[in-house]
Image (cartoon, rainbow, N blue to C red):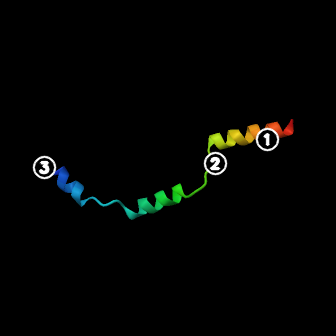
Amino acid sequence: MINFEEELKKFHPSLEIEDAEEAIYNQDLTDMADLLVKIVKDAKEEE
């Protein structure tokens, strides 16, 4: 039978995952809220 406590003690996160996480968080991504703010701002400037 698997001893989950012992298996958890052996667990170490993959370095590749940590590298990917850092790369994702360091990107400046535009989300839907940013797009809506820009659209409203552009529309007000055109009036």
| CA separation in Å, label 3 and label 1 | 63 Å
- At x 85%, y 39%, the residue is 46
Q: Which element carries disc 2, helix, strand or loop?
A: loop
Q: Which one is in front, 12 or 37?
A: 37
Mark drawn on residue 1: 3
Task: Specify the amino acid type for callout 2.
Answer: Thr
Disc number for residue 30: 2
Residue nearer the viewer, 44 or 12: 44
Q: Residue at x 23, y 54 (%)?
A: 8
Whichever of labels 1 and 2 marks the residue nearer the N terminus, that label is 2
Instruction: Determine the secondary structure under disc 3.
Output: loop
Amino acid on which disc 3 is placed: Met
30 relative to 25 in the view: left or right: right
Q: Which residue shows up at 80% across the image and 37% down it?
A: 43
Circle 1 residue? 42
Q: Is residue 30 above or below residue 18?
A: above
